Image: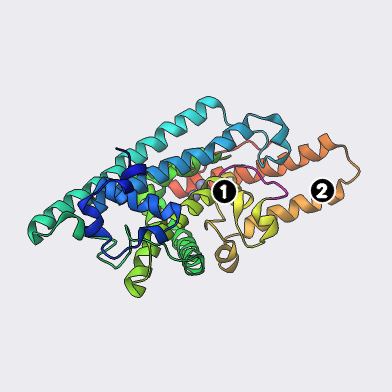
Amino acid sequence: MSFLNATTIPSPYYDALYPATDFSSLTWLEQQWVAWYVWIGNPIIATGLMSFIIHEIVYFGRSVPWIIIDATPYFRKWKLQVNKIPTAAEQWECTKQVLFSHFTIELPLVCIHFYAYRFLRLMEERQIWLFHPTAEGLGMSTYHAPFPSLKTMAPQVFLFFVFEDFFHFLAHQALHTGVLYKHIHKIHHKYSAPFGLAAEYAHPAEVFILGAGTILGPLLYVFFTKNLHIITVYVWIVLRLFQAIDAHSGYDFPWSLHNIIPFWSGAEHHDFHHMAFTNNFSTSFRWWDRIFGTDDKYRQYRARVKAAKNAMKNASKEEQEKMEQKLKDEVEAEGIRAEAEAEGSAPKTVKVQ
Ligand SMILES: [Zn+2]
Ligand SMILES: [Zn+2]
């Protein structure tokens, strides 16, 4: 049987997990949710598997449109570093590394969670579906239905965005220092012009460290409020994945979110981080970099591009593009020096074109 028809098949898990639930009052999605938990029959495995599957589907699913955009010359006019289009070989290399990370860090965590649970089960002599160590231990609803309302979910998701952004702002700066950079974060900086798939192209330790910012917010929130459903955490994670992949896309469209919400970071902000190596350490919002002045070079660069564009209003398109490329090359050359410094190696001599 599949989980989709599990609701029609009698199962002892109904009584165990959903003793006083009126299934006819649930939405279609909530019914599928119930069916999934009943089909798997173990909330720990069901939650772990669901988390892993959502991550893989959303990560690679969201990256596909960016692969198509990279392969379509029409979109080049919105590419931030137009001279650096990722090749198919680079995208494949990146995919392999990301999959390696997911399978070596994320999946074992799901398994460890399961074995820790089995151990606790022996200790507690409790039924398999009545004990849920981490999330439920802190008070999070998992298999429960119905889901919370949008009014409950929206402010929670916004809080997770704010928490993760600040956590990332601090941890990312730490990753730019000495040993942490040299042995961990350097991998993520392989691409000075990133692309969607490169969002999680990183050392497994970095996935673990920065991933903590995504998970800790919900765990702290539920610890203090005892009011959080895991479906809200999934909504948050899906939006966070969209944010991370889009920030690495390398494209700035007129309809990109930061052109509508000025404090949203977007690709235009993070692409500069990869190009210049310094500045713009946050993920979703621009405010911390602005407050702490870690966007000074970025703002100088934008001012220079603007001034040069004004000064060259009557020049040909080619001349304007050449000028913009020259400014980018200068920023990148400065970035290569800053990277060598962060690694503790002697500054390299870089030819500025
Ligand atoms: Zn970085
Ligand atoms: Zn990045």
Dot 1 amino acid type: Ala
**Pointer 1: residues within 10 angstroms few (<14), some, or many (20+)?**
many
Residue labelled with disc 2: 309
Viewer-nearest residue: 122 or 207: 122
Which image quadrant is residue 102 in? top left
Which span of residues is magenta-colored? 248-255
Q: Is mark 1 within 8 Å of ligand 2?
A: yes
The residue positioned 41% from the left and 48% from the top of the image is 181
Pick the residue in front: 317 or 19.
Answer: 19
Residue 84 drawn in magenta: no
Identify the secondary structure beneath mark 1.
Answer: helix
Question: Dividing the picture into quarters, in which one does residue 136 lie?
Answer: bottom left
Quadrant of the image for the C terminus? top right
Residue of label 1? 247
Is residue 273 at all visible to an observer of this figure?
yes
In the image, 111 versus 299, the foreground residue is 111
Check disc 2 and report its element: helix, strand or loop. Answer: helix
